[in-house]
Amino acid sequence: MTVARFWRENSPRYNLKAARCGNCGKISFPPRTVCPECHRKSIGKMQEFQLSGKGEVYSYSIVHDAPAQFQMQKPYIVAMIKLDEGIMVTGQVIDCELDKVDIGMRVWASFRKLGEEGPGGVIHYGYKFHPEL
Amino acid sequence: MREVAIIGIGQTKFGELWDLSFREIGIQAGLAAVYDANVASEDIEALYVGNMSAGRFIDQEHVAALIADYSGLARDHVPATRVEAAGASGAIAIRQGYFDVASGLHDIVVVGGAEKMTDLPDAAGAAIQDSAADQQWECVFGATFPALHAMIARRHMLEFGTTREQIASVAVKNHKHGSLNPKAQFQKEIKLETVLNSAKVAEPLTMFDCAPLSDGGAAVVMCAMEKARKYTDSPVKILASSQSSDTLALHHRRTITSFQATREAMKKLTRRSGVEVSQIDLAEVHDDFTISELLALEDIGFFKPGEAGKATVDGQTQIGGRVAVNTSGGLKARGDPIGATGVAQIVELVTQLRGEAGKRQVSDAKFGLAQSVGGTGSTVVMHLLGVA
């Protein structure tokens, strides 16, 4: 993934910035320029919205057959997290024993390294989730 | 709209076809279908090719023109179009051919699908499969295509009490069917323990829950029904075609234990064909993972939500059961050369409806359904075929 391709998503990936429709109030993450419910009525009315990063595990898997950029981490937990705002995101669950993760477990988002553009390349950051403190 | 018949079918063996190139695979399937249909090359008015990712698998785009050329159709300047919808690429190609003939634009059209996946190492092939999911918001965070299906499985187990053994039994059944199909990648029966104890891919799914990486091609010849009997005594009719979409990312769905796109496509298929689900004798469904077959069976309406696992264990989806599901062996055992898969489903249905399926023949088969999925239910394409 090139630098620009990652960099332009920094705001939502670093800070969980979503978009809230000024017409119906629906929150979209990643942010959208058009609300999927209101369509053209939402144009120009999408506002930035900060997600709390708190939520619970909706489903999860422990990945053993990992892509190249995750080889050093396997086996790792990947999960769908239902945030308290009702938004669902996909992310790793970290700082958690593999046999401790479960559906319904409370988690918080944390700012972590996601990967890098090869040795000496740009480092990518974004959210991962750890058990509620 | 005119009625559309399938008058010819062809398929290569699926598997690791090291001695065949992409173009040879495409031609072999296409020529087999054309011979079967008994049409001359100058009769062919258009070609559609389903292919997911030749650009990444073999560094070759523009594959419709390539296949047209090497099939000898370039001389006649036959329009050749490639279509892509990840795992549903072949099924979408079938749908384009159907539109073409049904609209009256052309009388005879060839639809093929091909993928050459084993020229790359397995890890590279798996990364390409992952690209059917949302690269920016799923895969970047460590989700893989098997992991997304594993999360579906985990949730299905929680909500319906589906057991790991019930999920695994899909692979056992499909390998049993595959053992009866000489074109299948895997023609060997397996035991439940094989599935449960094979290498973990994404828990709870193991290697034997996942369809393999495959090379292969499949093709059909479509013809206006009113002209089909000029070429064959056993045309098979396309009774209806339907397609639905859903969000690209799995995490944007209201539920992940059901694919709404399958449900919507099934509603349209029923309305357009007038055929009820209870009348369907056999189905080729998109078992890219074992859990996917259970979702398909429940979303199509063969079984109630949460009951497909038990039905599979009870043998209701075997040949001779209530509905014969994936008689070809499915993606799991027949193999899954992605672009060819949706076309191979149609090849199997036609083989069965003609009564030419040999040891795996479903007796007195009249209606056959195909369900093909792109991504984690983001695209679903369905066709209903019947004896003409």
Image: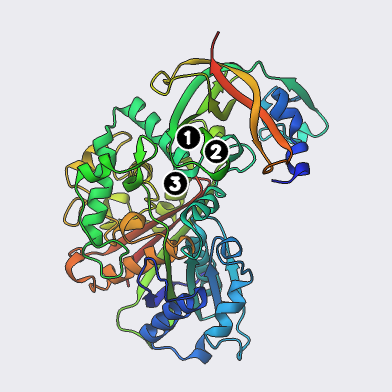
CA neighbours of label 3 inside 10 A, class few (<14), some (14 to 19), many (20+): many
Report, in whole angstroms, how far the alpha carbon at label 1 lies from the one at label 3. 33 Å
Rendered view: B367 above or below B253: below
Task: Identify residue type, mark 2.
Answer: Phe
- Picture quadrant of residue B182: bottom left
Q: Chain of mark 3?
A: B
Q: Chain of mark 1?
A: A
In the displayed structure, does residue B56 sit left or right of residue B163? right
- Picture quadrant of residue A114: top right
CA neighbours of label 1 inside 10 A, class few (<14), some (14 to 19), many (20+): few
Residue at position x 61%, y 77% in the image:
B65
Residue at position x 53%, y 70% in the image:
B49
Name the residue at the top extreme: A133
Nearest the eye: A75 or B226 = A75
| Rendered location of residue B32, percent (x, y) | 39, 82
CA neighbours of label 2 inside 10 A, class few (<14), some (14 to 19), many (20+): some
Report, in whole angstroms, how far the alpha carbon at label 1 lies from the one at label 2. 7 Å
From this viewpoint, is residue A18 visible? no
| Rendered location of residue B282, percent (x, y) | 27, 58
Residues marked 2 and 3 touching at CB (< 8 Å): no
From this viewpoint, is residue B234 visible? yes
| Rendered location of residue A54, percent (x, y) | 59, 15
Q: Which residue is mark 2?
A: A70
| Rendered location of residue B156, percent (x, y) | 36, 31
Q: Which residue is mark 1?
A: A74
Rendered view: B9 above or below B231: above
**Element assignment for label 1:** loop
Q: Which residue is mark 3?
A: B262
Q: Chain of mark 2?
A: A
Rendered view: B136 above or below A127: below
Badges 1 and 3, same chain: no
In the displayed structure, does residue B387 sit left or right of residue A31? left
